[in-house]
Image (spheres, grey):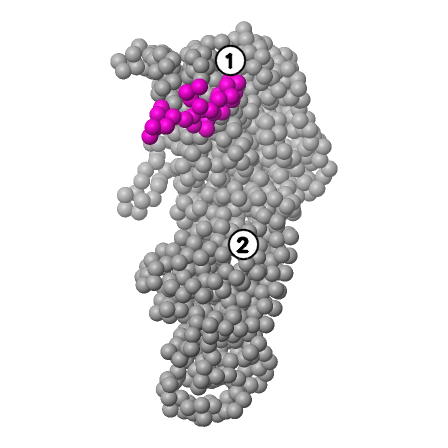
Amino acid sequence: MRSAALGRCLAPPSRGLCGRLPRAGGAAARKIAENAKESLASLKRENPRLEPTLAIIQAHNDNLIEEINKNFAKEVGLRVNHICLPEGSSKDEIVNEILRLNEDPNVQGLALDLPESLYCSKILNAVKPEKDVDGLSDVNLGRLVRGDSYDYVVPPMVCAVMELLGDLGGKTVLLMGAGGAVGAALQCMLQRKGAVTVSCQWNDPQLQTKLHQVDVVVVGSTNPDDVPVSWIKPGIPIISCFRDLLSDKRSNDQQNNHAAENGIGSLAIAMRMQNMVKTMERWFQSRQYRKWDLHCLKLQPLSPVPSDIEISRAQNPKAVDVLAKEIGLLADEIESYGQTKAKVRLSLLERLKDQPDGKYVLVAGITPTPLGEGKSTVTIGLVQALTAHLNINSFACLRQPSQGPTFGVKGGAAGGGYAQVIPMEEFNLHLTGDIHAITAANNLLAAAIDARILHENTQSDKALYNRLVPIVNGERGFSAIQLARLSRLGINKTDPGTLTEEEISKFARLDIDPSTITWQRVVDTNDRFLRKITIGQANTEKGFVRQAQFDIAVASEIMAILALTTSLQDMKERLGKMVVANDKKGEPVTADDLGVTGALAVLMKDAIKPTLMQTLEGTPVFVHAGPFANIAHGNSSVLADKIALKLVGEKGFVVTEAGFGADIGMEKFFNIKCRASGLIPSVVVLVATVRALKMHGGGPNVTSGAPLKKEYTEENLQLVADGCCNLQKQIQITQLFGVPVVVALNVFKTDSPAEVDLVCKIAKQSGAFDAVPCNHWSAGGRGAVKLAQAVKEAANQKNHFKYLYSLELPIVEKIRIIAQKVYGAQDIELSPTAQSQIDRYTRQGFGKLPICMAKTHLSLSHQPERKGVPTGFILPISDVRASIGAGFIYPLVGTMSTMPGLPTRPCFYDIDLDPVTEQVKGLF
């Protein structure tokens, strides 16, 4: 049985209504194919790697149609994937095949050659509109009728008919038995060309009259044998486009082939190929940078300002797929996690690689105090102001919060007031599981370390080797990662049976020195009792007992790698380079040596994709990675920034935040993150509050839960002036890197106008490009419009960005430069352990890595209680460790805990779930 779409047009001319087929089909088909070939060649010149593929699902046994499709495709330069289903295949079987091809990124066009009985809405509408080469879906037909020329294709059969008929101005065309999708499209196109259309069925009593009155007849289904030739007006053009027309009258296959090659059939198939090329042109155009069509959400701020979760819940966020489309993401570039979150695929970077980057803005702060500065709130308020109020494309890039602080003291990190990421409970809890993936990967590596030590301690070289390289199905071979280890060891062999005893021992034994293990297990919970533990106490571990510890999950080196990686390949290489211990000869042992790199990459394959969310005003946000800034480098991911910089366009802004004060998060942003990304920041926004400055000026200590003392609620200009020393110091630190700085002063209702004016005046006198009071917490983006304008102006200033130190300097000198120039220390003091580690890392070839200081965030010094700008202190370096995969050396200043503890009254006392509505309560 032939295809109802194209096969029906392959029947030969015969008597009756089929006797006057126009003769131009073959020549026209060749011309169409030649034009399509030229168009495709032009497209390939722009994109040499383009390999357009048309998939054709066929469910009949007629090889003629398949052959003609392949011939025309070859002539045009298209690849054809012919899927031949058995004759008699069910509708569900065909739909399943369609759905599979819809999701195949290597297939750009999809066509159907089916028996007529299978051309139904269920099948036709299963084809993705953007892949619908035959143009038979309801979506395509609706666009055709509406006249959206860019978004539709004309069905190939209709194209062929229109090509053969030529000029139709004022003529009357009779459509006989032409129904369904083809009939509707044909009628629309004929009328668009100026023809008057008349439709009728074969049993119409007025058939003879109508045949005499029209100028053209198009036959869309088999006619009865008793329609006399005498009913037809002499010389009238008749086009037949139906399946198996008078098939019992065919003389032989040769006649059939002749008709197929020279009639409307070949022309329709050529038109199909032309549609495929047009589809490719649209596909290629859709993958170019697109102007945003963002519809912001309206805010109606209340006074007094409700709780953060009440504000979040009162706003109705856009569906994430709608947001993605508004900012130029393609449907195949997002993976939705529910209605309001989606992962964004890294393929976007390749698609937009030629798109210029937007402006790059970093939000940092003064030295933190318990009173808070509001960097996240400023970040969100600034992008809401830029996009929702100044109509400038902008993206916020934030870290994912750890659940440790969320249930501990600090609470969430979605911003606050009317400058938030929503839904805030989804932002703060689990998100898309990235931290859980990091935990799983980290702990798999930790388990591999201890298991390897146990097995090496309890097995001979031969037994160990036989288990590491087992015989499977009668064959023995090295895995890819084992071959890589052999290569690093200088053993250039691939046959496991050819290794010598010495080579077997060298390969099989890592000889890890347990005392040098630096890799710890992690959990994303504040649990002080895991700061020191003993492992291996079960009898099954045969006496292998050692002291270990748990870190908070976000302190894992894998989190730092996630934040600094630039691609999946780069991440895999970084994971493999992670040094977990030294062997008994003092040489580093890596994840690659343990053979676990590939498994770690598998666990992290989804976590590497940034998560798309939105602000209260519907502007886009990327949430990705969450390293702490005191024990890691404290910045969101390079990948999120890079993707956002492409999406906002050349005149847009990407605003990201660095953890804690400028001396901590910003310094690491410049010296570590910018080195990894190659990106150059345009502006630094330095966040301060009057209350925090008062504390730096000598204000009294603040007790959690207790009312603020009058120094913080009443005007005190002297205290503000004294505290501005910290703000001035942070401005000076920013100037070390040659980047313009704008001070954002978060205003509280207890701040007096004189205090606000004083801070802004001192900031400008100290070298800030501008200093702007902000009210986004209470007013949303509207309250940060002046800040957005200042940032926009500052971004146009000449940039003199530079790194603080050269990587070629010795490790000690790099530490000293940070201590003296950033913290204001007189000098540094290395413990014997720290000096020993520096010597070891230098000997192992790690001396040219940047420095990531692990230091308290509560003071410029190593002493948390010293506020303002401490001077004259010696910075003690108690230990030095290395995150080789992440790519930095991290000195420990004093005693730094990598596992927070819970306070007497944690946040979890206030967090609850309504069992009826399933709404979360108490988050902040």
**Pointer 1 or 2: first along the chain:** 2
Label 1 environment density (alpha carbons within 10 Å; few <14, some 14–19, many ≥20): some
Q: What residue sits 49% from the left and 40% below the top?
A: 610
Of residues 95 and 368, the one nearer the viewer is 95
Magenta residues, start to end = 470-498
Relative vertical location of residue 67 with respect to residue 565 in this rendering, above or below: below
Secondary structure of the residue carrying numbered label 2 = loop
| Residue 549 showing in the rendered view | no
* Residue 55 included in the magenta stretch of the image: no
Residue extending furthest left? 539
User: Mark number for residue 52?
Assistant: 2
Q: Position of residue 143 (x, y in %)?
A: 50, 67
Q: Is residue 318 left or right of residue 871?
A: left
The answer to whether the residue labelled 1 contacts the one labelled 2, judged by CB atoms less than 8 Å apart, is: no
User: Mark number for residue 79?
Assistant: none
Residue extending furthest right? 798
Q: What residue sits 38% from the left and 13% below the top?
A: 461
Residue annotated with mark 1: 587
Residue extending furthest top? 832
Total count of labels:
2
* Residue 491 included in the magenta stretch of the image: yes
Of residues 539 and 337, the one nearer the viewer is 539
Choose top left, top right, bottom left or bottom right for residue 202.
Answer: bottom left
For the residues labelled 1 and 2, the Cα–Cα distance comes to 51 Å
Q: What residue sits 32% from the left and 59% below the top?
A: 92
| Residue 201 showing in the rendered view | yes
Q: Position of residue 721 (x, y in %)?
A: 63, 27
**Quadrant housing the C terminus:** top left
